[in-house]
Image (tube, rainbow, N blue to C red):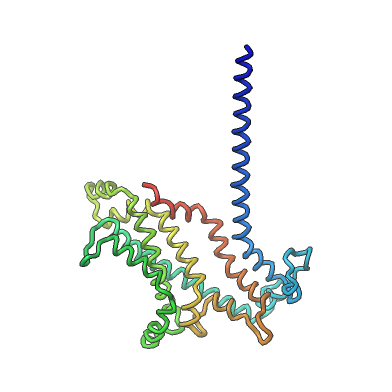
Amino acid sequence: MQANVELIGSKSSSNRRRKLSHIASRLVIYGLLLSWAFVALFPIYWVVTTSFKVAADITQGSIVPWLQYAPDWRGWGSLGLSPDSIHEPSTSREEFFKRFENSVIMAIGASTIAVTMGSLAAYGLARFDYKFGPWRNRDISFWFLSQLILPPVALALPFLVLYKELALLDTRIGLILVYTLMVLPIVIWIMRDQFGSIPVELEQAAQVDGSTVWGAFARIVLPIALPGLAAAFILSIVICWNEYFFSALLTSTNAKTLPVLVASQTGSQGINWWVMAAVSTAAIAPLAVIGIVLERYIVKGLTAGSVK
C-alpha cells in the first residue's frame, strides 16, 4: 500500500514538473514573439505618431501621445488631409492623390504583367526539360533569381539612354516595364515551386479525357495554384509600391510615385518630419490593409510548394 502511494506521488510530482516546464517554455516563446513584434512594429508606430507631432515634440523625443505631447494635425494639414482642410481646395492634396494614383496603376499593372508572364515561364520550367548549351532547368531558374543580385544603380545609365531613345522617360508605361522586369524573377521562382508541387498525373488525366495542354493548364493547374498566384501578385505589388530608385531616376513630373513624394519633403530649414511622416503613413496604409486582410493567402501561397 505504501509503495502504491509513493508511486502515485512520484507520478504526480513528475507530471507537475512537466507541466511547469511546458508553461516555462511557452512563456519564453511568447516573450520572444512579443519582443520581435515590438521590434517589427515600433518603426510603424513611430511614423504614425510622428505624423501628429510638431517640431518641438519631435526634437524632444516624445513618443506617447496624450501623455508626453498633444496630437496635432499640422502634418496632415500640409497635405490638405486634416479635418479642417479636407473640404477646402488644396494643391498639396491634389499632388498626393496624383502620386497615389501613379503608384496604384504602376504597381497593379506591373504585377499583372509579371504574374501572367512569370506563371507561363514557371510552368514551362516545372513541366518540361530545357537544354541551352550546358544549362538545364535548374540553371535557368537560378539565372532568373540571380537577376535580383544585380544592383539597380548598375542599370541606371543603360535605362536612361534607352528610355530617352524610346521616349519613355517620365511615362507610366516606362515605369511599368521596369517594375515588371524587377519582380518577374520573384514570380517565376515562387510559381515554379507552386507548379512543381502539383501532380502531373492530374494534367495527364485531363488530356486523356480530351483536354488540350492549355485546357489542362487553365482548368486544372491554375485553380490549384491560385494561392501561389495570389501570393506572387501581392508580393509584387508590395515591391513595386515601395520602389524608389527607378521612379526617381526615370520620372520628373507626370509619373512620379509616392516614395519619391515621401523623399521630397524637405524645406529650406531642413526635413519636415511631420509632413514626411504623414505622407509615409498614408502610403503604407493600403499595404497594411492588404497584409492584414490577405495574410492567410500570402502564407498559404508561399508555403504551398515547401511540402510535397
Q: Residue at x 50, y 52 (%)?
A: 296
Q: Residue at x 27, y 60 (%)?
A: 137
Q: Position of residue 77 (x, y in %)?
A: 70, 76
Left or right, 123 with respect to 68, comes to left
State whether residue 98 is above or below residue 305. Answer: below
Q: Position of residue 194 (x, y in %)?
A: 37, 54
Q: Residue at x 63, y 82 (%)?
A: 266
Residue 27, image quadrant: top right
Left or right, 52 with respect to 152, comes to right
State whether residue 9 is above or below residue 184. Answer: above
Left or right, 59 with respect to 100, comes to right
Residue 132, image quadrant: bottom left
Q: Position of residue 219 (x, y in %)?
A: 32, 53
| Residue 145 visible here | yes
| Residue 86 visible here | no
State whether residue 83 is above or below residue 215. Answer: below
Q: Residue at x 60, y 29 (%)?
A: 15
Q: Nearer the viewer, residue 60 or 65?
A: 60
